[in-house]
Amino acid sequence: MSLLGTVVGALWAMLPAYVPNNAAVLFGGGRPLDGGRNLGERRILGDGKTWRGTVAGITTGVVLAGVLNAVRERASEAAGVALPSFPAPAAVALAAGAMLGDILASFLKRRTGRDRGAAFPGLDQLDFVVAALALAAVVVPDWTRETFTPGRLLVVTVVTPALHLLTNAGAYVLGLKDEPW
Ligand code: CTP
Ligand code: MG
């Protein structure tokens, strides 16, 4: 497998986990998941994790997986790589896992005294990848092992932080996000 093929396959396989965060930024707002409640001195999660954002994020990831399934054969031919398809449980696990990772990261941020919007380098960029892969590994272990080969995993680990920084900086410039991380 060529390097380009590995990169294309890795990004394709992760797309249903990549878009939920961006969809949450676009469609989020309204009632917070934690209902405004505190745990100790601080909010459980904070106003940055909302019902609307979470539902929109998961839905967008799952719908995107469906679109990728529909164009997979043509895309594989065009790219010259066998791109993976997403069975429904895999699509849901990737999208929901990504949102869950982001939520867990906010929980950790609040517990470590960071206010909403504060940066937590490393966690901010990889929380959703780790959680998406972990949930997929539990829900669809065979699919996850076949899809996320060691080469693709390496690409995901290296490329995701860069992609995340880029899209968030873009959302910030467009006025969609309050901070560039
Ligand atoms: N968002 C949402 N629901 C989610 C995740 C994100 O509504 N489950 C929206 C919120 O409007 C949030 C924005 O997307 O403000 C940016 O997301 P993120 O950077 O994760 O949240 P922050 O506001 O920075 O809060 P935190 O410090 O908890 O990450
Ligand atoms: Mg943030």
Image (spheres, grey):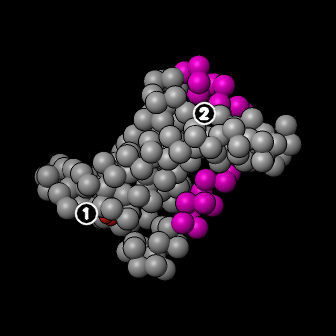
Q: Quadrant of ligand 1?
A: bottom left
Task: Tell me the distance, in whole angstroms, between the alpha carbons under discs 1 and 2.
Answer: 32 Å
- Asked whether 157 falls inside the magenta stretch, the response is yes
* Quarter-of-image position of residue 26: bottom left
Q: Quadrant of the N terminus?
A: top right
Q: Give the extent of the magenta segment.
A: 141-167
Relative image position of residue 110 (x, y in whole percent): 29, 55
Residue behind mark 1: 29
Q: Is residue 121 above or below residue 157?
A: below
* Residue 126 drawn at (x, y percent): 53, 50
Name above or below for residue 171 compared with residue 55.
Answer: below
Locate residue 130, reporting x and y percent: 52, 40
Numbered tag placed on residue 85 in the rendering: 2
- Given contact means CB atoms under 8 Å apart, are the residues at marks 1 and 2 in contact? no
Above or below — where is 143 with respect to 179?
above
Can you tell which quarter of the image residue 89 is in? top left
Of labels 1 and 2, earlier in sequence is 1
Please state if 108 lies on the left or on the right of 71 as rendered.
left
Residue sitting at 50 percent across and 40 percent down? 66
Disc 2 marks a residue whose amino acid type is Ser
- Is residue 83 among what the camera can see? yes
Instruction: Report whether 71 appears left or right of 20.
Output: right
Q: Is mark 1 within 8 Å of ligand 1?
A: yes
